[in-house]
Image (tube, rainbow, N blue to C red):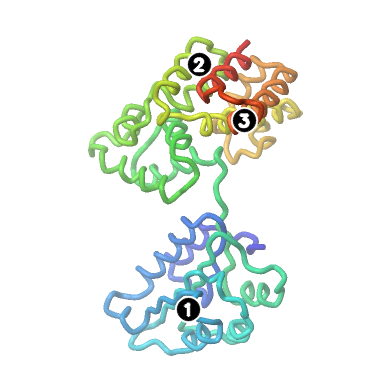
């Protein structure tokens, strides 16, 4: 759907070089990148004194395509460009006036349409072609859980800070894939770092985000990977006594994702190569691949299949199926015992 080769980084690179397109259609389920691009355009294309007359914010629920096209055809006043931002673009149904506008767009207008939590209507090929011909069609896709630690590392590195693998995993698993919330928490961590020590450690994560450095999802997975019975039971006991620290509804997907990937790893033709295994599993980097190599040593393929079946059983019970009164903590203990024995 989106243009080949168009990425967030490529768009930002062109913007920073002031190589503007007359039209940007930003869509997708991850609002973070849509907001980043839009905010840069709002804050950097025009000087502050030029914005009153040359920057317009519209909402798709309040205007139609013809009105947007009329605004886009205006000339800037005492500025090189005018900027038109259309939020909630998904509410624009009849796009024919915009298709007509894109046949001859104003070179002095930068029109940005923000379509969050959805995509452009692929049943309108003329509209899609018009967007791609003169502008940028960008799809902002949610990151997969396995891509969050590298994202965290890159975000901090760009701000002159570093983080170890464990800390990145802890943050990723405790906050999840909401990038707006994730970056907000990372910014809070960055503010806490002294100028002479820009390292994010598990202790920093515990102090600033409130996730125990010893009892968290990362440590539980590590215990399962290495079949550390004592450590796994310690963590489950902690979660049982501190439900806010980790519930069954958070831990089950974490455990399932690992063993699901471990099952896939068994079919890799070159399972002894970290790079080949990363590619086989669809990882962008070999980050975290060692735990799958260790898992294949500690679990047979048959056992992994049984564990996946048990996880589905526990998931059903946690939702009340064939389970009149077993509490979530006991269900999690049952799963951990089955996994490790």
**In this picture, residue 188 sits left or right of residue 260:** left
Q: In this view, does 295 lie above or below 12?
A: above
Residue 9, percent from left and from top = 50, 56
Mark 3 falls on what kind of element? helix
Labels 3 and 2 touching (C-beta < 8 A):
no
* Front-most of residues 128 and 212: 212
Within 10 Å of disc 2 (Cα), the crowding (few <14, some 14-19, many 20+) is: many
Q: Residue 315 carries which label?
A: 3
Q: Which mark is residue 232?
A: 2
| C-alpha distance separating marks 3 and 1 | 44 Å
Across the whole image, how many numbered discs are drawn on residues?
A: 3
Q: What residue is drawn where x is 50% and y is 69%?
A: 88
User: On the image, which quarter does residue 302 sit in?
Assistant: top right
Mark 1 falls on what kind of element? loop
User: On the image, which quarter does residue 293 sit in?
Assistant: top right
Q: Which callout, 2 or 1, points to the residue nearer the camera?
A: 1
Residue 23, percent from left and from top = 53, 75
**In this picture, residue 35 sits left or right of residue 210:** right
Q: What residue is drawn where x is 70% and y is 27%?
A: 263
Q: Is residue 244 above or below residue 113?
A: above
Residue 80, percent from left and from top = 39, 83
Within 10 Å of disc 3 (Cα), the crowding (few <14, some 14-19, many 20+) is: many
Q: Quadrant of the C terminus?
A: top right
| C-alpha distance separating marks 3 and 2 | 19 Å
| C-alpha distance separating marks 2 and 1 | 54 Å
Q: In which quarter of the image is the N terminus?
A: bottom right
- The first of marks 3 and 2 along the sequence is 2
Residue under circle 1?
62
Q: What residue is drawn where x is 66% and y is 72%?
A: 128
- The first of marks 3 and 1 along the sequence is 1
Q: Which callout, 3 or 1, points to the residue nearer the camera?
A: 3
Within 10 Å of disc 1 (Cα), the crowding (few <14, some 14-19, many 20+) is: few
């Amino acid at each position: 759907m989106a243009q080949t080769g168009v990425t967030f980084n490529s768009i930002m690179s062109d913007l920073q070089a002031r190589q503007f397109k007359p039209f940007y259609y930003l869509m997708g389920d991850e609002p973070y990148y849509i907001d980043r691009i839009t905010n840069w355009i709002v804050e950097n294309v025009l000087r502050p004194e030029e914005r009153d007359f040359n920057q317009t914010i519209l909402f798709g629920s309040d205007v139609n395509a013809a009105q947007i096209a009329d605004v886009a055809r205006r000339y800037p006043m005492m500025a090189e460009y005018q900027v038109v931002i259309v939020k909630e673009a998904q509410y624009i149904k009849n796009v024919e006036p915009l298709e007509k506008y894109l046949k001859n767009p104003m070179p002095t207008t930068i029109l940005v349409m923000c379509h969050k939590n959805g995509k452009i209507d692929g049943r309108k090929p003329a509209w899609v072609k018009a967007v791609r011909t003169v502008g940028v069609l960008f799809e902002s896709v949610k990151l997969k859980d396995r891509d969050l630690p590298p994202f965290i590392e890159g975000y901090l590195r760009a701000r002159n800070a570093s983080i170890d693998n464990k800390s990145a995993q802890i943050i990723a698993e405790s906050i999840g894939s909401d990038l707006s919330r994730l970056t907000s928490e990372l910014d809070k961590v960055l503010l806490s770092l002294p100028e002479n020590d820009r390292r994010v450690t598990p202790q920093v994560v515990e102090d600033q985000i409130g996730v125990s450095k010893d009892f968290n999802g990362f440590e539980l997975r590590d215990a399962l990977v290495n079949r550390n019975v004592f450590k796994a039971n310690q963590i489950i006991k902690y979660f049982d006594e501190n439900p806010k620290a980790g519930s069954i509804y958070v831990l089950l997907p974490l455990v399932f994702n690992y063993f699901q990937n471990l099952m896939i790893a068994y079919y890799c033709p070159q399972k002894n190569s970290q790079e080949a295994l990363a590619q086989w599993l669809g990882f962008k980097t070999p980050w975290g691949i060692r735990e799958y190599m260790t898992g294949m040593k500690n679990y047979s393929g048959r056992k992994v299949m049984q564990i996946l079946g048990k996880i589905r059983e526990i998931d059903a019970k946690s939702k009340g199926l064939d389970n009149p009164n077993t509490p979530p903590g006991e269900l999690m203990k049952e799963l951990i015992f089955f996994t490790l024995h």
